[in-house]
Image: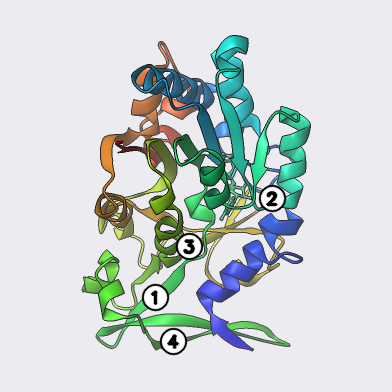
């Protein structure tokens, strides 16, 4: 069977039976997990987001719904609710959009029954009539990517064939409608290195275009690892794609080992992401590193989460606003 890398990654992560997130993941963080997130390593991010919700809702007190997309084991929302305290927590309706049955059970166990769970963001926004504070941490890096490689003077797409000996890659000329190509900065790039690889988050672009028309007011906080383009690919001729299995980072053909039993992920191209949000009419009210965001909201914060040369600098945060 031959399929595009994007199709392989979508199945490996989200196939309802065999997919890593959909049905195989044991835990996010801890010794049972394959990777840790900022939310599972420290309460600081939750404390900063709680402060962000508090400050935002002073200016728009009529927005009473909070939505987290892709909530992992629920630790981030639990910390946000703890920081807001009993009274303020009860001023909001809390929603989680989660497509993993296993993680949804863990969230229910941690957060109790007062949360409203949804399969899709469109459903959550309909329940809020389009007015909500929204946040997500390390969600977009779990979306499938189209994997492209510069070869003989033009971009090709990586396809994958599986046979009894394992997985083999092959290249086919990249095909994408001309009107869509302009939304992906890499396609117009002549890379300095032959055989440069890049990832296209076309699935994120399509996902945004599905729900953004249903969101009428509020702010969205997007937190992930990545960089602006082309800095993202400096000294990364093979791109940013990788797998995580038992806290080990795997690259090259190792990403095809254990499909459905290891995480697959790629950095976010924030140049593209910003352009998509702006062309949807959103205003970027704030952007910076995770370290900047935590320092802005949590007095006296210290440790790896705010280390500008570690996690504090690698993670970027964007706050986009939908004005009424
Ligand atoms: C890398 S984990 C991050 C978990 C959590 N946000 C944290 O910081 O610990 C990605 C999360 O997003 C969820 N997810 C991935 N794709 C999703 C989608 N399209 N819609 C909703 N949830 C999704 C996964 O099931 C998982 O809960």
Residue 95 relative to residue 306: left or right: right
Return the disc, 4 or 2, that comes first in the chain's sequence.
4
Task: Tell which tag, 3 or 2, sits nearer the viewer.
Answer: 3
According to the picture, the residue beneath numbered tag 1 turns out to be 148
Where residue 303 sits in the image (x, y, percent)? 48, 22
How many C-alpha atoms fall within 10 Å of the one at disc 4: few (<14), some, or many (≥20)?
Answer: some
Return the disc, 3 or 1, that comes first in the chain's sequence.
1
Height in image: 171 above or below 87? below
Tell me the residue at 62%/52% (across/down).
248
According to the picture, the residue beneath numbered tag 3 turns out to be 241
Depth order, front residue of 311/119: 119
Task: Please tell me how many numbered marks the rendered image carries.
Answer: 4
Tell me how far mark 4 sits from mark 3, CA to CA.
Answer: 17 Å
According to the picture, the residue beneath numbered tag 2 turns out to be 246
Residue found farthest to the front:
129
Depth order, front residue of 10/95: 95
Report if the CB atoms under discs 3 and 2 are less than 8 Å apart.
no
Q: Secondary structure at mark 3?
A: loop
Return the disc, 1 or 2, that comes first in the chain's sequence.
1
Q: Secondary structure at mark 1?
A: strand
Return the disc, 1 or 4, that comes first in the chain's sequence.
1
According to the picture, the residue beneath numbered tag 4 turns out to be 171
Q: Secondary structure at mark 2?
A: loop
Tell me how far mark 4 sits from mark 2, CA to CA.
Answer: 30 Å
Tell me how far mark 3 sits from mark 2, CA to CA.
Answer: 17 Å
Depth order, front residue of 66/156: 66
């Amino acid at each position: 069977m031959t399929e595009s890398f994007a199709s392989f990654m979508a199945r490996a992560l989200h196939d309802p039976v065999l997919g890593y997130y959909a049905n195989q993941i044991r835990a996010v963080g801890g010794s049972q997990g394959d990777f840790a997130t900022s939310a599972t390593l420290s309460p600081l991010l939750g404390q900063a987001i709680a402060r962000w919700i508090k400050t935002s809702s002073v200016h728009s007190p009529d927005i009473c719904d909070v939505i987290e997309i892709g909530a992992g084991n629920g630790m981030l929302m639990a910390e946000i609710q703890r920081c807001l305290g009993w009274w303020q927590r009860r001023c909001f309706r809390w929603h989680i959009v989660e497509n993993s049955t296993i993680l949804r059970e863990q969230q229910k166990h941690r957060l109790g029954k007062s949360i409203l769970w949804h399969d899709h963001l469109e459903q959550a926004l309909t329940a809020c009539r389009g007015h909500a504070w929204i946040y997500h941490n390390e969600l977009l890096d779990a979306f499938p990517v189209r994997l492209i490689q510069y070869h003989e003077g033009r971009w090709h797409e990586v396809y994958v064939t599986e046979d009894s000996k394992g997985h083999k890659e092959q290249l086919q000329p990249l095909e994408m409608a001309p009107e869509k190509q302009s939304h992906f900065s890499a396609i117009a790039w002549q890379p300095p290195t032959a055989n440069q690889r890049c990832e296209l988050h076309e699935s994120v672009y399509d996902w945004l275009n599905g729900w953004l028309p249903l969101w009428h007011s509020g702010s969205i906080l997007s937190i992930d690892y990545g960089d602006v383009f082309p800095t993202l690919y400096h000294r990364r001729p093979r791109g940013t794609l990788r797998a995580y299995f038992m806290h080990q980072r795997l690259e090259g053909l190792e990403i095809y080992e254990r499909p459905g039993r290891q995480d697959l992920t790629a950095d976010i191209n924030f140049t593209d992401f910003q352009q998509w949000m702006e062309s949807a009419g959103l205003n970027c009210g704030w952007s910076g590193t995770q370290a900047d965001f935590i320092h802005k909201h949590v007095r006296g914060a210290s440790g790896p989460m705010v280390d500008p040369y570690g996690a504090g600098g690698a993670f970027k945060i964007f706050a986009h606003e939908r004005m009424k």
